[in-house]
Image (cartoon, grey):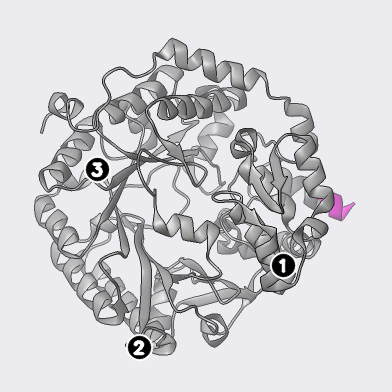
Amino acid sequence: MSEQQLRRGPGGISTPPSLSETLEYARAQVAAIQTEPLRAAGVYRTPLEYYLVGTYPPLKYLHDIDQSEVYKGMTPSQNLYLHMPFCEQYCTFCHFYKEINAGTDRVDAYLQAIHGEISVVSEQMAVGPDGGLAASSVYFGGGTPSYLNADQLTGLFEHLWRNVEVTPDTEITFELHPGVVRRPDYEDRLDAIAAGRVNRWVFGIQSMDEGVLTTLNRGHGREEVYRLLGLLADRGIDNLNVDLIFGLPFQTFENWYSTMTDLLAAGVGKFNIFPLMFKRSDPITRQYIKNPENFPGAEDRLVMHYMAEYVLGAEGFRRGPVFYYSRAGEHSQQQQNKFDSIEEDNLVGLGVSSFGYIGGTQYYNVCDNAEYMKTVAAGRTGVWKGHTLADEERVRRAVMFGIRAGGVDFAGLEKTFGIDGTELFAPELRRLQDLGLVEVTDRRLVLTDLGCTFVDGIGHIFASDEVRERVLEANERIESPSSDPVDRYDYSPIGRLDLPGGIGDRHRDQVRR
C-alpha cells in the first residue's frame, strides 16, 4: 500500500491545524509558564537533567534479594512484561539492555532461558484458577521483539500460553521495528505474531524526517513505516500505536509537525510521545554535550510538547496516561494498570534486565545476558535486586505513578494502608497547588494541564528521605556510570549521577562537603 493510499485511509485526517496556528498556540502556552518558581521547587529540569520516574524505589536503592521474597504476595491476575534484547542496529538514544546482530544460536539460547524462567515463575506462583499465571495483559518489549524469526516467535508463544492463562479480553502487545519489512521472511514473522494472539501492535518511529532518522541510526526510513502500516492494514489490524520522541538532533518545529500530521493522515490512532532522555552510556548524550546547538533547547522542547497537545487534541485524541494519546477508547491496559492499579494487578518482569512490582516488592532481573542464562539454567529465575516496601513507601509510590493516569485516591490509600496521604504530603501538596500543578478535591489528587507537562519533575518530590540518602550512598560506590549496571539501568531522576554537572553530581558534592 502506497503512502498516498495510506493518507486517504480510514481514520486519516483531511485538514489538520496549520503549522502557524499550532505554533501560535504552543508558544503562547510556553510564554505563560513561569520557569523560575518551578526550577526552585525542583520541578523544572533542563534537557540533560530530565528523566522519567520509571521505578520506585530506584535500582540504586535496591539490594540483593531472593526470588522467594519477590514472588510472595502475588495478586490473582498480573501484567506480564517479556524483554527481547536483540536489535539490528544501535539506536543512538536507546538506554535499554540489548545485543546487536546476535546469531540464530544466541537467540535460541536466550529463548530457552526465558522459556525456563516462565516455567519456574509459573510453578512458583500457581495463582490462576487452573494453576500458573493469569495475565490481564502481556507486553513483548525490547530491544526488538520482531528480531525473532517466525519459528522462534511461534515457539515462544506456544510455551507462554502453556504456562499463562489468558482470555479473549487479555491485552497482548508486541513491539515491532519498521525495518522488519526488509527481512526476507517479514510476512511469516507478522503472521506468526498475529497467530500468537497479539491484539495490540506498537512500533517505534520516533520521527518521519529522513535526516533525523539517519542521525539516530534507526535503520529505517519513511518508506518502511508506510510499508509496515500497509501490511498491518492488509491484515485487518487496527489496534496499533507508534512511538515518537521530541527534542531529537536536527529536529525542527516543521519536521516535528510533519511527523505528527503524516502519521495522522495515515490513520494512526494511538501515540506514545516522550521527550528525549539522556544517559551517559548513550551515544546521543555525547553528541549533545559536544554539539548542543544541533538539538532543540529547553524552551523549544516545551513548544514541541504543546504542539503535540494541540494537534492531537484538535483531532479528538485524549491524553491518558500522561505521554500516551488515543483517539478512541483505552490506550493500553498494561500502561493504565502500571499507573493506577498495580497493587491489585502486579507487574511480572521476565527476561534479562526486566523489572517488576509484586506484592509490594520492586525488583529487577539481572542486566547481563550471559549471567541471566546461567542463572536460569541453574533452575532459578533472573531475579537480581529488590526491596519490599513498607506501607508508607507504597503510598509514596502510588502517588508518583497515580498522577500519570487517573489520579490519586487518598481515601482509598488510607483504607488500604492506614496512612493519610493528604497529611503525610501536606507541605508538598500546598507547594504544588500554589504553583498551579495539581488540584486536590475530596481527597483526590489530579494534575492540571501544566502539571502534566512536568509530571516527572513532580513525581520525584514524593520520594522519602531514606530513599534519597541511600541513592546518594550508592552514588559514592559507583566509579563508572557508563559501565556500572546499577547506574546504567537505573530508570529514575532521583540522585542522577550519570551526567557531567547534573543533579546527581551536585548532590554528591554537597554530601562530600
| Quadrant that contains the N terminus | top left
The residue at 58%/58% (across/down) is 490
Q: Is residue 459 above or below residue 70?
A: above
Residue 131 disc label:
2
Which label lies toward us, 3 or 2?
Answer: 2
User: For this view, does 307 lie left or right of residue 200?
Assistant: right
Quarter holding residue 48: top right
User: For this view, does 488 lie left or right of residue 353?
Assistant: right
Q: Position of residue 169 (x, y in %)?
A: 30, 64
The residue at 72%/34% (across/down) is 436
Residue 503 vs residue 334, the one in the foreground: 334
- What residue type is disc 3 on? Pro
- Check residue 465 for magenta coloring: no
Residue 414 disc label:
1
Which label lies toward us, 2 or 1?
Answer: 1
Residue 243 disc label:
none
- What residue type is disc 2 on? Gly
| Residue lying farthest to the right in this orientation | 513
| Residue lying farthest to the top in this orientation | 20
The residue at 77%/28% (across/down) is 36
The magenta region covers: 509-513
Residue 178 disc label:
3
Circle 3 crowding by C-alpha within 10 Å: few under 14, some 14–19, many from 20? many
User: For this view, does 315 lie left or right of residue 7?
Assistant: right
Q: How far is mark 3 from mark 2, CA to CA?
A: 37 Å
Q: How far is mark 1 from mark 3, CA to CA?
A: 46 Å
Q: Most prominent secondary structure in the magenta stretch?
A: helix
Quarter holding residue 432: top right
Which label lies toward us, 1 or 3?
Answer: 1
Name the N-terminal-most of marks 3 and 2: 2
